[in-house]
């Protein structure tokens, strides 16, 4: 865990905007007892936050084998290297997606993944491709989610909650 703590410490000192997002998600995880997360955003800060949390099941999908494969060595992390089109639907409490990722049909992906709706969806990098982010959000809103927090810093982030 020392490596995880070191990464989070560096982020808290050097990337305060990212660290604020991490702290918000940490509180969200603790308050709502999030036990599982699917993340396709290759970011050490978010990954370390999930590894250090009480989440018992983390599925990390990344096409960046060289840099992120080591996260698969943590017992609660399942490392997957697949295109989004090939991701199988499973039951998770939280999805964390990189909204800037080039993908043919985000709306189809959202519809498919939300057949088993999670409590929360985190969209990162929302400021990089605003048009694509708007399309993704429209698809998510159709599935009865609402925005509970928006971050304009560190490339943007939107946190959505399932409305019952």
Image (cartoon, rainbow, N blue to C red):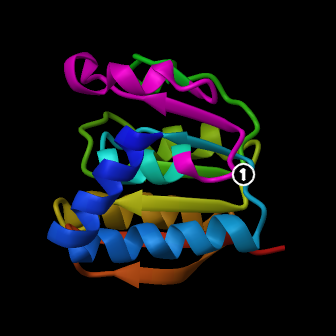
| Dot 1 crowding, Cα within 10 Å, few <14, some 14–19, many 20+ | many
In the rendered picture of this protein, how many numbered marks are placed on residues? 1
Instruction: In the rendered view, tell whether residue 14 sits above or below residue 110.
Output: below
In percent of the image, x 32 and y 33: which residue is there?
104
Location of residue 85 in the rendering, given as x and y in whole percent from the top left corner: 45, 24
Element at label 1: loop
Location of residue 107 in the rendering, given as x and y in whole percent from the top left corner: 47, 47
Task: Indicate the quadrant where residue 103 lies.
Answer: top left
Name the image quarter holding the C terminus: bottom right
Location of residue 150 in the rendering, given as x and y in whole percent from the top left corner: 40, 81
Name of the residue lying farthest toward the right: 164
Query: Along the horizontal axis of the image, is 128 left or right of 59?
Result: left
Name of the residue lying farthest toward the front: 2
Q: Nearer the viewer, residue 100 or 144?
A: 100
Asked if residue 58 lies in the magenta stretch, the reply is yes
In percent of the image, x 53 and y 68: which residue is there?
25
In percent of the image, x 22 and y 78: which residue is there?
153
In percent of the image, x 42 and y 60: which residue is there?
123
Instruction: In the rendered view, tell whether residue 107 sits above or below residue 77.
Output: below
Instruction: In the rendered view, tell whether residue 141 sits above or below residue 10.
Output: below
Asked if residue 66 lies in the magenta stretch, the reply is yes
| Magenta region, residue range | 52-77
Query: Along the horizontal axis of the image, is 138 left or right of 135?
Result: right
The reply to whether residue 125 is visible in this rendering is: no
Q: From the image, tell me which residue sits under label 1.
A: 93
Query: Along the horizontal axis of the image, is 68 left or right of 34?
Result: left
Location of residue 124 in the rendering, given as x and y in whole percent from the top left corner: 35, 59
The reply to whether residue 137 is visible in this rendering is: yes
């Amino acid at each position: 865990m020392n490596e995880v703590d070191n990464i989070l410490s560096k982020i808290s000192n050097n990337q305060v905007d990212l660290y604020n997002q991490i702290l918000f998600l940490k509180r969200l995880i603790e308050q709502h007892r999030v036990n599982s997360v699917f993340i396709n955003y290759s970011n050490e800060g978010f990954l370390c936050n999930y590894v250090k949390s009480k989440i018992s099941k983390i599925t990390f999908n990344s096409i960046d084998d060289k840099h992120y494969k080591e996260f698969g060595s943590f017992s609660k992390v399942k490392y997957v290297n697949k295109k989004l089109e090939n991701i199988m639907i499973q039951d998770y409490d939280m999805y964390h997606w990189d909204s800037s990722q080039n993908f043919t049909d985000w709306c189809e992906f959202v519809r498919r993944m939300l057949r088993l709706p999670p409590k929360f969806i985190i969209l990162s990098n929302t400021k990089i491709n605003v048009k694509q982010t708007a399309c993704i959000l429209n698809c998510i809103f159709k599935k009865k989610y609402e925005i509970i927090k928006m971050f304009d810093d560190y490339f943007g982030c939107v946190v959505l909650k399932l409305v019952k």
